Image (cartoon, grey):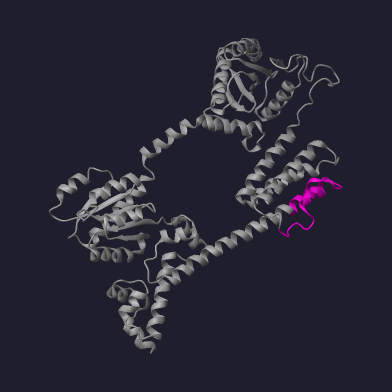
Amino acid sequence: MHMAMYKLLIVDDEQLIVDWLYRLFGGLPRLNLDIYRAYSGEQAMHWLNRTKIDVVLTDIHMPGMDGMRLLENIKSRWPDCKVVFLTGYNQFEYVYTAIKHDGVSYLLKTETDEEIVGSVEKAIAEVERSFRDAERLDKVNQQVNKAIPLLQKQYLSHLLWGDQALLPVTQAQLDDAELPLRADLPVLALLGRMDHYSGQSNRPERNRLIYTVRSVIEDVAFERMHTAFVHEEPYFIWLFQPSASVSDWEQACLYVREMLDTAQRICAESLHVGMSFALGKGTCEWGMVAAKAEGLKRLLNFRIGPSGGVIATEGDPGSDEFDGSGSYGPPRPDSTLLIQLNRIGKLASALERGDKEEFFDTFSEVADYLKGVRNIRYAPASEVYLSLSLKLISYINRWGLAETQLWPGGLERLTRLEFDSWADATDELRAVAEQIFTVQARHLENRERDTILRVQKYIFEHLSEDISLVKLGELTHFNPSYLSRLFKQVTGTNISDLIHQARIDKAKELLGNTAMKIQDVSAAVGFDSPAYFAKFFKKSTQMTPQEYRDSVT
């Protein structure tokens, strides 16, 4: 766990005060502050327009933009920023106005260093508490509640795709998604499809129509049911269980089936929408929901009669029980195939995130499935293999790896299915995936190395300047806080420690090899106060600059 770094901005039109406070807080590494200086309200806005500041320590009475106007600008840009005003004895009417704002405090310029440091520490503590603020969490929870339909859709979509990570379905999962179903009971399933409709085809209007159709069907057919719904274009899918007033499952299924005709007519006559339905016969355990949905899709697509307005139930003419041979009905869905295709979706996600461990754990499951297939022409196995190979090829193309010399035999061989066994095929895919992760690791290492070298080079070349994390973040196109953590993770050293050490090393070089005056050495390594430079140098070397020069010359 990394120690949080906070940004402190010091603002005053008196340069001596700003520089004094800068040195004061710069000498307190325990606070882990990234410190910025501004000698006017306008200069303060330069920083506030570039980065989020956590605490501003500012004078109130300044020419141009005074502290009160600066406060307004701070709160308009960074509402959570804490402001500590430095005041004189005659400025209390300003203070009275200022402290009406949240996160604003004040102290007199005559206070001791300890009091000033304590006020900033208190402000930082308030920032930290805000992360756990109950009101903020309530707002987040309100946003989550608004997103419940999306969370339900995601959960049900993954379940219907056969995501094994969701099995066994638990009551906690259903409750978290606020689905009014019981995990200890089976479900009934209904599939619907919009065959045609009259109206505009733009997405917002279509979404509104989908919601209206859903509401009509639920109002008519599911009045006495507990339901969960998801729309997976072009299908409407309901999972339902009888309510207490309809305790009999067969009766519940019969009720829904008979009311679908009414729902169908309302959609056609009032909404000008043609609907077809396929209703599952009998209950379905949660672990078989994906296979049930796939079966209903095939049943709905196996049409007899008009091309729309179908209401079919498993076991009806037109289903897989129409005759004993099954020649007139859809084949039974392969639930194993759905599981493997879902795993391939996980593989693609792991590949994008660079999660090698998760990728190959899941890959092994897919490989075990393929290696268990003896027939090299088995269509479901071909679909699984080709789905995975295309994911790999797509990734290689999108990241510009296709033109490299990493694939001497060419990538097209991955789609030819010219293998003696599925074991050989999976070994080929594994080899390609291993190569991708090797390249990923190499590129990541190169990017990290280039970033660190760029930061180090900039620091060494600009020691006479006020080097800030904001500037380094802009240089590398990273968030300053993230850059600080990355630098520490890769090098084992804080950026601030590197800057300090680089300044000491450069100062030693100038003191030992040149005749520069100590005040010029101070300026050359980024210190505007020779006295502060001497104090800083002695703290690091146990010698004053002059003592060091005398010891090496």
At x 62%, y 52%, the residue is 354
Number of marks in picture: 0
Is 251 placed left or right of 120 in the picture? right
Residue 297, quarter of picture: top right
User: Which quadrant of the rendered structure holds the C terminus?
Assistant: bottom left
Q: Quadrant of residue 135?
A: top left
Q: Quadrant of residue 448?
A: bottom right
Residue 467 magenta: no
Q: Position of residue 392 (x, y in %)?
A: 70, 48
Residue 114 in picture, x, y percent from top left: 24, 61
Please provide percent x and percent y for residue 3. 42, 57
User: Which one is nearer the viewer's eye here, 425 or 473?
Assistant: 473
Q: Where 168 falls versus 388 (above or below)?
A: above
Residue 408 lies within the magenta run: yes
| Residue farthest to the left, as pictured | 90
Front residue (pair 171, 504): 504
Is residue 177 visible in the rendered image? The answer is no
Drawn side of residue 249 relative to residue 375, left or right: left
What residue is at 48 percent from the left and 68 percent from the top?
Answer: 456
Q: Is residue 271 left or right of residue 435?
A: left
Compared across the picture, whether 218 is left or right of 63 comes to: right
Is residue 154 at all visible to an observer of this figure?
yes
Does residue 109 sit above or below 391 in this rendering?
below
Q: Identify the magenta region.
A: 404-431
Point 79% across, 36% down: residue: 380
Question: Residue 507, percent across and down?
Answer: 38, 78
Give the residue drawn at x 73%, y 58%.
Answer: 406
